[in-house]
Structures are given as C-alpha cells and as structure tokens.
C-alpha cells in the first residue's frame, strides 16, 4: 500500500508480534506494546514504537543488514532533494519551557552502561558552564593542544607530543617518568622568596647588643672544623683533676678527647695528662699539690662519619647520614630572590 500522507492521532506501532502474540507466545504487556508509552487510556499520544530496526536517511549509507537498531544517515539529495538539511543528527532545547539539565542527552545509565566509539574528523565542544569527566584511567595518543587555564586532579597518562598555550594550574602531586625535550625558550616568571644558591655564605656568626655600651653591637663568627667538636675550659689551682661534665657520657667519643694545658703563675714543664677515667682527667706534675694552670678540653660528638669532601652539586648529594645536620644556605639562611 502506498499513500501520500498518513496522520496518526495517538500512537504508531510497528511490531513483529500480533495482538494475540502469534510470534512471541501469549500476549503480555511490554512484549508487544511498550509499557513506557502507556497502554490503553494511559497511552501517550504522538508516540512511535518499533520493535525492529529503524533507518532514517539514505538507505545507501547502510548496505549491510543488522548494523544497528537505529541507523541515521544524511539524506540522498538525488532521491529526496527537498529533505536536504545541514546536520545529520541534532538535539535542541529551543521552544522548551524546561531549562537545560545534565540529563538532557543520556547515553547509557548506571543500570545499563554502554560502550561508545567515535570515528570523526573534527569535534567541536562549546560549553558555557563546565565539563565533568570521571574516569579511573584516561589515555590519549597524538598531538594535544590546550589553550586556557587547566586544573587537574588524579592520574593522567599522555603518549605523544603535548602543546600548552595558557596557564596550567596543577593542585596535585605530579610524577613525571618521561624524557622531556625543549626546542624553544622557556620563560618562568620570577617568584620572590628564598632559594638555595649552591654555596653557603662566607661566615656564620651571631649579632647581639653590646653588653655595656648603648648604641653599639657585638658580632662574632663561628669557629669551623672538620668534626662535630665540643669543649670545656677553665682554671685549676691546688688540684690535679679536671672533672668532665656528666652529660658528656653518651654524647662525646672519649677516644677523641684532647687536653691543652697552660701553666700560670710560674713555668711547669713537667705538667702532663696522666690518665682519663671515671669522667675525670688526671694530671701529673713534679709540683702535684701546687698545680696552677688553664685548661681546654675538646671532644668529638658521637655520630655518623663526617665526609668533609665529596662529589656533588648540592648538599642533597652528601653521601652520608645528614639527618642531624643543619646546613647554612640550604636548610636555613637562604638568600632572598
């Protein structure tokens, strides 16, 4: 039957099953008549149902049978010149009293997810608000161009060349295991702050107010040496024993202790260190009961071996344990940018 125009007042059904269910057995709602379009008095007018394959557009676009349930193609202008349009498929919210929503166009849903493949020449996306993409892994291959601000959260794998034009804001940890090659000039804005220059300042000291003269100050410079040394000093008179502080036990390597003695009042060439034991330094002299001298005792702190000279570009290259070290110009006292 061929007719020029058909007007259906309620619904149009194209079904392979008859009213009695000749092909599908006993009739049941949803088998022949779709429940979602309503049945009987509840039917939604202006609805179309087909339980087979639907082709819209030129039949020449789908020569093989069974490519898809819904097939859409551009019209053949020779077969139907009056039906020529600009787009093959279009969704619009014009003339609608309902504002746009995130579910205006749905492809799959949580209870019925689907896969999707796109074979295109160009994709243009113009978004007035935002685009949200949630994926455990996103992989891209090829040249990627980006213009504008970028904010990223999560893991990202890129294979191929990448070109960025604009501001790139990264609020996550970045792990880069690939080789980067820069063939142009890289311009980095100057950021004011403190930075490591690769060298310590010449002298390390302290600066205090003068203890007795107002308006003046006193500056001292620290002694440097290839060890973590500490010392005590004092004066003996009428005794030949120097008491070592109790806290030196467990702090100082006693095998590194050295003692400097300076007789005072009169020469004493016989004065020497006889023994170090029981946290005491025992002196000996021909004038044992009349010892009078200045003393200075040095010892090296117990700790990891100090590597005085080593290969490297910064203190980060130090070959030993430096967890107990504070490095001028590196961990503190950095220069201002």
Image: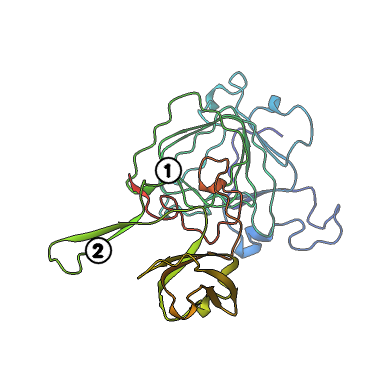
Nearer to us in this view, 181 or 260: 260
Query: Within 10 angstroms of label 1, few (less than 14), some, or many (20 or more) residues?
Result: few
Question: In x, y percent, where is residue 237?
Answer: 40, 78
Above or below, comparing residue 64 to residue 261 in the picture: above
The disc placed on residue 295 is none
Nearer to us in this view, 268 or 303: 268
Task: Report the side of 234 relative to 13 (left or right).
Answer: left
**Tag 1 and tag 2, C-beta contact below 8 Å:** no
Above or below, comparing residue 73 to residue 29 in the picture: above
Above or below, comparing residue 41 to residue 182 in the picture: below
The disc placed on residue 199 is 1
At a point 73% along the width and 39% down the height, the residue shown is 68
The C terminus - image quarter: top left
Point out the frontmost of discs 1 and 2: 2
Instruction: Give the secondary structure at mark 1.
Output: loop
At a point 51% along the width and 60% down the height, the residue shown is 228
Q: How far apart are marks 1 and 2 (CA)?
A: 25 Å
Instruction: Give the secondary structure at mark 2.
Output: strand
């Amino acid at each position: 039957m061929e007719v020029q125009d058909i007007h259906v007042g309620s619904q149009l059904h194209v079904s392979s099953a008859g009213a009695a269910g000749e092909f599908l057995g006993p009739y049941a709602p949803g088998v022949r008549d779709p429940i979602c379009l309503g049945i009987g008095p509840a039917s939604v007018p202006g609805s179309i149902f087909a339980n087979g394959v639907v082709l819209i557009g030129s039949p020449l676009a789908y020569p093989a049978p069974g490519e898809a349930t819904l097939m859409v193609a551009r019209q053949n202008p020779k077969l139907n010149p009056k039906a020529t349009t600009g787009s093959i498929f279009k969704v619009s919210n014009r003339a609608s009293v309902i504002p746009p929503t995130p579910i205006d166009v749905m492809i799959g849903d949580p209870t019925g997810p689907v896969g999707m493949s796109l074979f295109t020449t160009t994709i243009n996306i113009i978004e007035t608000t935002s685009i949200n993409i949630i994926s455990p892994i996103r992989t891209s291959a090829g040249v990627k161009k980006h213009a504008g601000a970028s904010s990223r959260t999560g893991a990202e794998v890129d294979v191929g060349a990448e070109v960025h034009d604009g501001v790139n804001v990264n609020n996550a940890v970045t792990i880069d295991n690939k080789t980067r090659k820069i063939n142009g000039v890289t311009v980095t804005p100057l950021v004011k702050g403190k930075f490591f220059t690769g060298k310590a300042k010449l002298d390390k000291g302290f600066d205090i107010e003068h203890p007795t003269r107002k308006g003046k100050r006193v500056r001292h410079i620290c002694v440097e040496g290839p060890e973590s040394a500490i010392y005590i000093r004092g004066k003996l008179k009428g005794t030949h024993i120097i008491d070592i502080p109790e806290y030196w036990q467990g702090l100082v390597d006693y095998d590194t202790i050295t003692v400097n003695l300076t007789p005072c009042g009169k020469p004493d060439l016989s004065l020497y260190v006889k023994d170090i034991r029981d946290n005491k330094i025992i002196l000996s002299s021909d004038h044992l009961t009349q010892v009078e001298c200045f003393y200075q005792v040095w010892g090296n702190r117990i700790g990891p071996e100090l590597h005085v000279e080593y290969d490297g570009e910064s203190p980060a290259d130090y070959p030993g344990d430096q967890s107990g070290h504070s490095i001028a110009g590196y961990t503190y006292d950095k220069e201002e940018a």
